[in-house]
Image: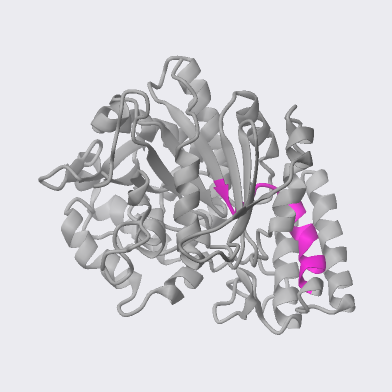
């Protein structure tokens, strides 16, 4: 693969430069942006980019929040996709975005795990192979950022906000952060964890595909039955700990669904797949990776995001190794995590709730791959003692702007919150930017978990 070749080039040609970036950082003269590298392990480098909000209003009792955005894939670049195509201050054409989340919080984008986007390793053997390893690297990064960013030192509550596979990162990282704070190893205020259309329980999502697509007429009853049988195999393989086999079964299942649904877009069932969600739909035994980044790239107008990230943005940042070629998604990283891909992270969410951490689950109505139905199913498996009360409460309608049309629903009990976002697919901030902005404002106003 191209990314593997790039890594080999690094190790041969750029070793002295790579070693020099152990704690490299830079920024704008006015301090509104900072970025840099942290060597989280020897020869493994994570890239981060911080934006200070021009709207910040902070008081001793209510410090201005900071959001860390965790992209999915696995292998997709948060610094490129989440930043320029979803919630950052500039859009894909490098023009100001009206719905940037900077209106509600400072933002930190990270190319996570190592090997993604501008992040890199000097040897592919250093890529993470589990969500827990990714969480360990990110915890090391946060320890460095607390020293780097005065706002975090001053108590700005940190919110881990995730999308897609990034939800697995967020759940494991959230637990790691709480443990590190309690142990006195990390001086940080954790405000909460938000899981957007997140791949927390693969078996619950797989089990939802047949019924969901039948109800919206993308499959008939025969197709739904076929999908349900595949889902049963996925459940059995996960129960037996056969995660690699379960991933292969899921890949075959998605291939079949795409073909027999008239090429439904699994990120939005109202659309056809102009971007096939499976990289190699022609191979029945394929272990192919979802084309996570292609949907977002299709929303960008004009020059491609690759052109900007390898051109104007790279030139601005100055510290990116010159031989590094930014890619929207690294399949080397995807395949390195392949044995962890189908492992659920429900227990980690339960642990966060037990610590008193605010946990928000939000889901787009039109998503298939991480459907709202699947998210509701895994939430109902939580062992949290407030679950029964949470499920018994009515949902509250959500509105946005001057129109009174319902844009979604929300339910909250103690430190668990769930948002259903109408008219949105997998990428909520892209499809419904107004209600997404309101939502993140509500999330970041929630009480933070105190420092230890």
Residue at the bottom extreme of this rendering: 262
In front here: 350 or 21? 350
| Whether residue 286 is situated above or below residue 347 in the rendered picture | below
- Highlighted magenta segment, given as a residue range: 195-213
Residue sitting at x 65%, y 25%: 354
Residue 67, percent from left and from top: 40, 42
Taking the image as shown, residue 360 lies to the left or right of residue 226, namely left
Residue 377, percent from left and from top: 77, 49
In front here: 256 or 288? 256
Q: Main secondary structure of the magenta part?
A: helix
Taking the image as shown, residue 244 lies to the left or right of residue 102, namely right
In front here: 56 or 129? 56
In front here: 64 or 49? 64
Taking the image as shown, residue 133 lies to the left or right of residue 249, namely left
Residue sitting at x 58%, y 72%: 279
Residue 451 visible in the picture: yes
Residue 245 visible in the picture: no
């Amino acid at each position: 693969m191209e990314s593997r070749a790039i890594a080999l080039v690094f190790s041969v040609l750029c070793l002295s430069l790579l070693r020099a970036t152990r704690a490299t950082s830079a920024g704008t003269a006015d301090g509104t942006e900072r970025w840099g590298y942290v060597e989280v392990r020897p020869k493994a480098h994570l890239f981060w980019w911080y934006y200070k909000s021009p709207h910040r209003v902070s008081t001793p009792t209510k410090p201005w929040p900071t959001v860390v955005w965790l992209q999915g894939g696995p292998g997709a670049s948060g610094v490129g996709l989440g930043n320029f195509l979803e919630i950052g201050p500039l859009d894909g054409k490098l023009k100001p975005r009206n719905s940037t989340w900077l209106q509600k919080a400072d933002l930190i984008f990270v190319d996570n795990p190592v090997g993604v986007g501008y992040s890199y390793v000097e040897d592919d053997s250093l890529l993470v192979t589990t969500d827990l390893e990714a969480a360990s690297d990110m915890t090391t990064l946060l320890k460095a950022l607390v020293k780097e960013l005065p706002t975090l030192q001053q108590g700005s509550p940190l919110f881990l906000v995730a999308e897609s596979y990034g939800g697995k990162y967020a759940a494991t990282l959230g637990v790691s952060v709480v443990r590190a704070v309690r142990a006195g190893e990390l001086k940080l205020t954790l405000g909460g964890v938000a899981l957007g259309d997140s791949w927390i329980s693969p078996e619950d999502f797989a089990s939802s595909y047949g019924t969901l697509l039948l109800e919206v007429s993308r499959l008939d009853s025969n197709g739904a039955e076929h999908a349900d049988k595949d889902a049963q195999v996925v459940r059995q393989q996960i129960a037996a700990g056969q995660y690699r086999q379960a991933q292969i079964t899921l890949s075959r299942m998605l291939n079949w669904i795409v073909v027999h649904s008239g090429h439904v877009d699994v990120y939005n069932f109202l659309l056809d797949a102009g971007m096939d969600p499976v990289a190699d739909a022609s191979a029945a035994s394929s272990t192919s990776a979802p084309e996570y980044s292609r949907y977002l790239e299709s929303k960008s107008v004009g020059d491609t995001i690759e052109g900007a990230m390898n051109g104007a943005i790279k030139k601005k940042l100055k510290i990116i190794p010159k031989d590094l070629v930014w890619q929207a998604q690294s399949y080397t990283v995807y395949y390195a995590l392949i044995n962890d891909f189908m492992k659920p992270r429900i227990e980690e969410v339960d642990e966060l709730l037990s610590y008193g951490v605010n946990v928000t689950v939000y889901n787009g109505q039109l998503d298939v791959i991480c459907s709202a139905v699947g998210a509701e199913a895994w939430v109902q498996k939580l062992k949290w003692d407030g679950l029964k009360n949470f499920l018994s409460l009515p949902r509250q309608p959500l509105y946005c702007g001057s129109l009174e049309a319902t844009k979604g629903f929300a339910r909250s009990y103690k430190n668990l919150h769930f948002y259903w976002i109408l008219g949105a697919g997998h990428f909520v901030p892209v499809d419904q930017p107004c209600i997404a902005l309101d939502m993140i404002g509500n999330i970041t106003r929630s009480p933070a978990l105190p420092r230890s």
